[in-house]
Image: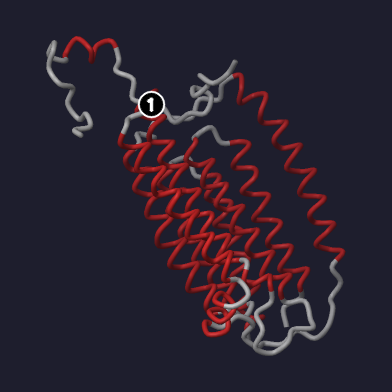
Amino acid sequence: MIPIPHVLFVSVLVFIIGMLGVFLRRNILVVFMGIELMFNAANLAFVGLGRIPPVEAGIVPDGFSIVPFVMAVAAAEAAVGLALVVALYRASGSVDIDVLRSMKG
Amino acid sequence: MSILIFYPLATIVIGLSAGVILAPNPVHSAVLLVAAMLGVAGLFLCLGSEMLAILQVLIYAGAIMVLFLFIVMTVDTRREEVQGRLAQIARPIGLLLSGCLGALLLMVAVSFSERGNDTDEWYASAASLGKTFLNEYALPFEIITLVLIAAMVGIAIMSRERLFDRPRANQIKELPTGGKASGGITS
């Protein structure tokens, strides 16, 4: 029913919006939210491409069964990343990525 | 039926995603992101997988975004974003890179011609997904549990030993001399 290019189109738009957030925002928390948006766009593309026929009945396409793995990795990434953000905030008192430059050589 | 829901929902998801990036207050961004995640769950439902929609609501909108909101409200983010020299440089480069990659991805998306007859059947129901995970994806399924446990242990160590918490000059004076530092590890 829903054509695959339309699903991919939505996925690309969400991915680009997430990437713009990563590039243009200075707040590290919003940068993380952009990364989460990109994860969602990738999941959407996986699901859209998993619908390419032929699909045998009762067998889950790989595009669908990869999505829970992506979600699990995203959960681990978000937890570790937010712990790092809190540690950086305690050390420097800021979440601005222009201020957090102490690793610059 | 699902085609009637897909296009309005996709528009809403794109609008909410743009709101996440454009909202000046990070708390607003987080709340908009929760709504966008719920919209993506609706898109999964339209695309024929109720299990992925449930997982999306539980894991993303439930677990990850609650963590996000918790941290956003813990960390003081109310001050305005200063657009310094670095931001001035990053803005055109970021726009250029996003535009290039966006054009490339759109070309890929358009090149997928409409193939075959798409039906409204359920592609990944809970039962079939569970069978897949316990048969052909058994090993990756176990490995992902290791990844999650490694993340949990890493966070516990990182927040326990205070790796980044260097005492500042004014805090050192306040500590009693010879006394045990508060919050230290007792072992």
Chain at numbered mark 1: B
Q: Element type at marker 1?
A: loop
Q: Hey, which residue is sitting farthest front in the picture?
A: B187
Res B13 quadrant in image: bottom right
State whether residue B40 is above or below residue B129: above
Q: Quadrant of the C terminus of chain A?
A: top right
Which residue is disc 1 drawn over? B164
Q: Quadrant of the N terminus of chain A?
A: bottom right
Residue sitting at x 43%, y 53% = B149
Residue closest to the eye, B152 or B124: B152
**Going by the image, does B83 lie left or right of A89?**
right
Residue type at the position of mark 1 = Phe
State whether residue B129 is above or below residue A41: below
Return the x and y of residue A42 as percentages of the image width and height.
65, 59
Return the x and y of residue B131 as percentages of the image width and height.
56, 82
Residue sitting at x 43%, y 55% = B64
